[in-house]
Amino acid sequence: MLIGFSEAEQFLRSCKDAVIITHRNPDGDCIGAGLGLHDILSEIGVRSRVVCHDSFGARYAFLTEGYTEEDFEPQTVIAVDIADTQLMGSYEEIYGKRVQLCIDHHESNKGYAERTLLNAKATAACEVIYQLAKHMGVEITTHCAMCLYTGIATDSGCFKYSCTTPEAHEIAAEMMRSYDIDFARINRAMFDIKSRGRIRLEAELSSMMEEYLDGRLVIVAVTQDMMKSMGVSIDELEGFAPITIQLETAEVGILLREREDGVFKCSFRSANDVNVSKICQTLGGGGHAKAAGCTASGDLDSIKTYLTDAVRKALEE
Ligand SMILES: [Mn+2]
């Protein structure tokens, strides 16, 4: 059931001992939304714990520092930035069927939660968390401001993707104006810093781009073996997908990353008008018009053929 801010507030004010689930392969938005909501809940006297299938990683230390995980048996289950319970990883089995509140901004949200606070126009889940905090009249702490800024900067690609709304700029401006947050450092941590392995990998992968459909589709595939030989982990490849649409003829780009279980995570990007969320929905995934994803299993060559067929259909529409 879709709900509004008042119902979400009512629910949060009457809940206790909440677990906040973030999606696997976490990014700045789900981490920011999870930890930001944790701050808001602390202020209204509700204990919460933020969980994720994967660890948050050193890149997010500026957000996780000072966060201590409390031990309690959860009475309340909340999901943030999660369109589909599959994205919960190992937490799907434990909590997937009993999510009481989902706070999200994905148009493709499956409606798996008892209550869904959805703003499909929002740039980031953090934008929805901000609106909720404002609605509730809860004071936003400096840490919470850092979380919200990080999420909005992440999902807007540092305010340059077409999903960037005026509201995203306004919220970021308010965070800059009202709090002492080092936004330059946040953006450097989110967008500029790369491991040595990542820099080497980028150089290698740039030369390995495969063009399909007369260069309108670019695929870059990274296997577990390649990650091992380059000394990088799958989460260090987060944020790498946009390179697939750097080629001037590219309409759609797909970054394939092999998970440890052999399943490929497919991250789609659209350079112009192709709605990649629609393509991914036909392949069992989802996301946004310009950035979406799905998973695929099987051997790499057949996956490439299957993805190329799906993109060809979309281009012909
Ligand atoms: Mn998001």
Image: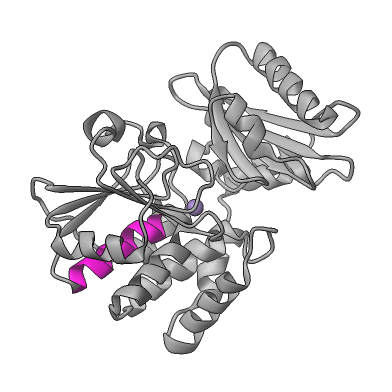
Residue 60 lies in quadrant: bottom left
Residue 195 lies, in percent from the top left, at 56, 50
Farthest residue to the bottom: give it: 177
Which residue is pictured at 69% across the width and 47% down the height?
A: 242
- Residue 203 within the segment the image draws in magenta: no
Q: Quadrant of the image for the N terminus?
A: top left
In the image, residue 159 sits, relative to residue 263, either above or below, namely: below
User: Colour mode?
Assistant: one colour
Residue 202 lies, in percent from the top left, at 69, 43
Which residue is pictured at 56% across the width and 78% down the height?
A: 170
Left/right of residue 254 with respect to residue 195 in the rendered view: right
Q: Tell me where the magenta segment starts and ends, as one range.
A: 31-43
Which residue is pictured at 64% across the width and 35% down the height?
A: 278
* Camera-nearest residue between 69 and 284: 284
Farthest residue to the left: give it: 72
Residue 248 lies, in percent from the top left, at 88, 45
* Residue 33 in sight here: yes
Which residue is pictured at 89% across the width and 41% down the height?
A: 249
- Residue 32 within the segment the image draws in magenta: yes
In the image, residue 170 sits, relative to residue 283, either above or below, namely: below
Residue 111 lies in quadrant: top left
In the image, residue 295 sits, relative to residue 137, either above or below, namely: above
Residue 45 lies, in percent from the top left, at 13, 69
